Image: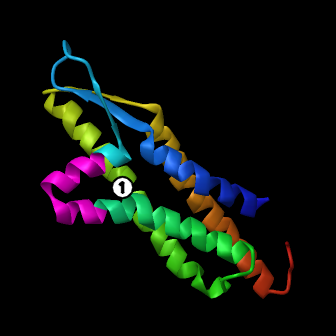
Amino acid sequence: MIKYLNLTLLVLFPVAWFAPLMRAGLLPLFGLSEISVITGLQSLWESDVFLALLVTFFALFAPYLKTIGLALIHFGFLRRSTLPVLHVLGKLAMADIFLIALYITLTKGIGVGRIETAWGLYLFTACILASIAIGFATEKRARAGDRGVNRN
């Protein structure tokens, strides 16, 4: 069951990357622009390439590589000894959620513009949290398997 939940993340992550994370505008009178992970990265590539590389790694590559790695473990194509590396990737992937929350808090605190969270933020957060839960469950199964208990 857990391996199929992990496989759904391979579909849900790209959806979450293109889904609107938030709607932002400068003044309440003007319309709000939708911001997604991809549109945010596009803006970053135009202004700060180094930061864009970091955010691209944290938001796209880290969670997807972890999901692919877990799938390879679940289907027996990768050794369970790689789980600590995948665990670190999961922690790195969660860093971008905190960055987004920080930006929202700062923007609301300054009071210059208007910002609203959108459904994509919740989807993206749910994907990251599901990936963390699947990683923990996989580690638990690996430890149980090392003690001679087979739960496949």
Label 1: how many residues lie within 10 Å, few (<14), some (14-19) or many (20+)? many
Q: Quadrant of residue 92?
A: bottom left
Q: Quadrant of residue 137?
A: bottom right
Span shown in magenta: 40-54
Q: Quadrant of residue 49?
A: bottom left
Above or below, 105 against 25 in this view is below
Q: Residue 110: percent from the left, percent from the top?
A: 14, 32
Q: Using residue 148 as the reference point, say whether residue 19 is left or right of it.
A: left
Amino acid carrying label 1: it is Asp
Q: Nearer the viewer, residue 119 or 91?
A: 119
Q: Residue 134: percent from the left, percent from the top?
A: 65, 62
Residue furthest toward the top?
Answer: 29
Above or below, 24 against 73 in this view is above
Q: Secondary structure at mark 1?
A: helix
Q: Residue 94: percent from the left, percent from the top?
A: 43, 58
Q: Residue at x 46, y 74 (%)?
A: 88
Residue 136 among those drawn in magenta? no
Q: Residue 38: percent from the left, percent from the top?
A: 35, 48
Q: Residue at x 51, y 54 (%)?
A: 128
Q: Which residue is mark 1?
A: 96
Q: Residue at x 52, y 73 (%)?
A: 87
Q: Quadrant of the C terminus?
A: bottom right
Above or below, 29 against 139 in this view is above
> Does the image show residue 139?
no
